[in-house]
Amino acid sequence: MLIPHPLLGLRDAQEFTYLGDAALLNRPDGLTAPEAFNDYVYLRDNPAGVHRELWFHEQGDRSWLIVTRNTLTHDILGVELARDVALGAKGAK
Amino acid sequence: MRYSAFRVLKEALTGHKGWQPLWRNPDPKPAYDYVIVGGGGHGLATAYYLARTFRKARIAVLEKSWLGSGNIGRNTTIIRSNYLLPGNEPFYEFSMKLWENLEQEFNFNAMVSQRGILNLIHTDGQRDAYRRRGNAMLLAGADAELLDQAQVRDMAPFLNFDNARFPIKGGLLQRRAGTARHDGVAWGYARGADLAGVDLIQNCEVTGFRIAGGRVQGVETSRGYIGAGKVGVAVAGSTSRVMAQAGMRLPIESHVLQAFVSEGLKPTIPGVITFGAGHFYVSQSDKGGLVFGGDIDGYNSYAQRGNMPVIEDVAEGGMALMPMIGRARLLRIWGGIMDMSMDGSPIIDRTPVEGLYLNAGWCYGGFKATPASGYAFAHLLATDTPHDTARAYRLDRFNRGYVIDEKGMGAQPNLH
């Protein structure tokens, strides 16, 4: 599997470590209800099909990426820098 | 029909005309007392024990494809009970004891072979950890022996004992562990369940649950609506997809695990050998193929096939452990979809929907658990109380802080 890094071009997936669903970017703050934290830490949508997920370029430029990937075929449909997505979400608020 | 040596002899003399199909192929009835979703190892074992041990009732198993078409036919066939934690070890030892009598019980050759499993030790710290694990196994009534280097050398002289990074210093041996014929297990349970009156319904995909007033009424399927008193779901690999139809989000990610088998070779490997430090384990099938594997690929997948980096990693592990494996040619590689739970341990429990029960989260360890999983799930379905050895496998244990995390990895499924 090759991941098209927005800055570095096609990189081998072996250079990355995988964290999971990109929804993990939206961490609840410390004042939220315990149930919301339980859902954040333990529950996952786990879809068969299109999945947005966090990959860390550990053996590369150490940037976090959001890769949109089909879990049924392993096709990669899009890649963004997680930083851009997180800042974009903050700017939108 | 009962299988026996006498029967084989009789059929041999009469032209093998008396053999019959192992099970009927019935159409679904409008309603059942119990509907088991998933005709794999765990679903078939559940139906078997429910019908045989717990109660006479109308029972159906619904399978979207053919029986045993999922992970029961895609694993590396290892049976063992060498776990550490008190929530796990009694359950897996119960499973081991069921394996030991399985073939006599369901009158089918599952080729259960107690050829032993050897976990290799490379450091003092690892020896301490395995000594502790061995003691935990003995406390739960299992067997365990700590071997020194000379004893390991007697068993497996072909290993690379002087690897610079991971020299072999000893091992933890469970002699009662071993392998079984994975398809045979599914067929044996299916035949046994069918003989006890269970309807095994193939090509019948569950497409939805009918729920009214917080209670399950039945399931919508590709072959029409089927009413049910109780529904048990045992569809590891696809659990999130099926349970989403009941509106549930689960502490599970689906990951792909690859397995490998070489061409047939003369008997070489005694039992199962695991090289945890190098992410590699190997055994030899009765046909002679070296059956081996390593870690999961590590990303969400429903594809039943993996990628090259893990194949390379497993091959490197094999070469580091037993350099002679480099002379064997690889015959097949395949992948199976694992229900990776958030603590690496399974779930056998009721759900918030009354009458709907869940058997899931087996990670890459479901095969060895097949008998106990079926027994415990049948116990839960029949009595509404958990089996003694499966009390820790609650669905809400994550919320309550009672995770069963053998490796202490936290809520990160690709590290379990």
Image (tube, rainbow, N blue to C red):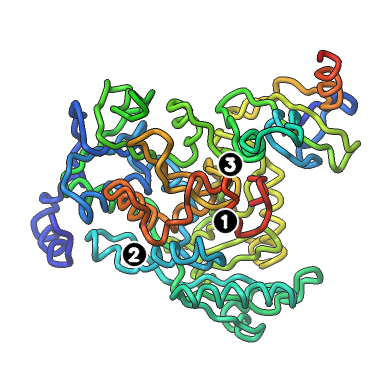
- Residue lying furthest bottom: B150
The amino acid beneath tag 1 is Ile
Q: Position of residue B357 (x, y in %)?
A: 38, 40
Would you place residue A83 above or below residue B179 in this image? above
Quarter of the figure with residue B9:
bottom left
The residue singled out by tag 3 in the image is B256
- Report the mark closest to the observer, 2 or 1: 1
Mark 3 surroundings: few (<14), some (14-19) or many (≥20) residues within 10 A? many
The residue singled out by tag 1 in the image is B404
**Residue in view at x 50 percent, y 33 percent:** B240
Between disc 2 and disc 3, whose residue precedes? 2
The amino acid beneath tag 3 is Val
Q: Secondary structure at mark 3?
A: strand
Q: CA distance from mark 1 to mark 3?
A: 22 Å
The residue singled out by tag 2 in the image is B98
Protein chain holding label 3:
B
**Residue in view at x 74 percent, y 28 percent:** A26
Quadrant (top left, top right, bottom left, bottom right) of the N terminus of chain B? bottom left
Between disc 2 and disc 1, whose residue precedes? 2
Q: Position of residue B14 (x, y in %)?
A: 8, 56
